[in-house]
Image (cartoon, rainbow, N blue to C red):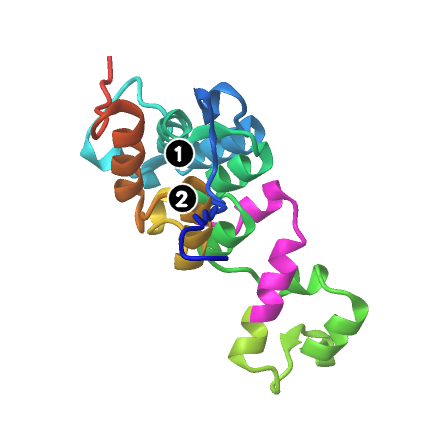
Amino acid sequence: MDEHTATTSTTTHTTATPSAARAFIERQLPVSKLSKESYKERKSNMGQTLTALGKWWGRKPLVLVRAIIQGLLLPDTDDTDADRETFLALMTMDDDGMLRRLDAMPAAKIYGMLTPREQAEYFTTEGGKLAWRRETGKLDRKSVTHRAFLRMGYDERLLYCKRPEEIDGPSPEAWQRINAHLGTQATSLAELVAELGARRFGGVPRVGDV
């Protein structure tokens, strides 16, 4: 190749490609999981986040409001599986997010989700009382608890989880996956709303409650 020969290079991008500028909510929405999360929020009664601020007769569950706003901002791309995984990660309704929301599980429940070998390795039933083995350290107990939790169905997991608005959103690792798919640089839900809002609407979107 001499000095007059022109060379070109191509760069492969891994970010999602919008499909006809359609929003995620126009293609799909995990209605079943959202319904279960909304029911959990409603059943918390006085524990609901906005209850202490006053009576709001037509209030919708916060988890549903968050889902609608994010569903309108997220793009519908040609990778529907990745779109759904990104949405669930933002809602902390994926495995990683639900582990962050995990509050506490009784030993008996953890024990019941383990295999016979795991039960014998981590628990003792001497004297007819179930207990962790003394040699099982904190890190091992946490790992085993997470293992048992992830073997549950979604409905059962919710019994031992905080609600999405009770934690600070996705983990740093989840944000890396989210940004890689969306081509964003957000580290919080507010930053993501600003970025996607500017991309879709030309500025931070405003929501009007009619």
147 horizontally vs 6: left or right: right
Magenta-span inclusion, residue 148? yes
User: In percent of the image, x 43 and y 29: which residue is there?
Assistant: 75
27 horizontally vs 151: left or right: left
Q: Residue 87: which disc?
A: none
Q: Tell me which label, 2 or 1, sits earlier in the chain.
A: 1
Q: In the image, which residues are magenta? A: 143-162
Q: Position of residue 93 (x, y in %)?
A: 50, 43
Amino acid at dot 1? Val
User: In percent of the image, x 51 and y 56: which residue is there?
Assistant: 99
From what the image shows, is residue 77 above or below residue 189? above
Which residue is label 1 attached to?
A: 63
Whether residue 91 is visible to the viewer of this picture, yes or no, is no
Magenta-span inclusion, residue 169? no
Q: CA distance from mark 2 to mark 1?
A: 7 Å
From what the image shows, is residue 197 above or below residue 119? above
Kindly indicate whether the residue at mark 1 contacts the one at mark 2 (C-beta within 8 angstroms): yes
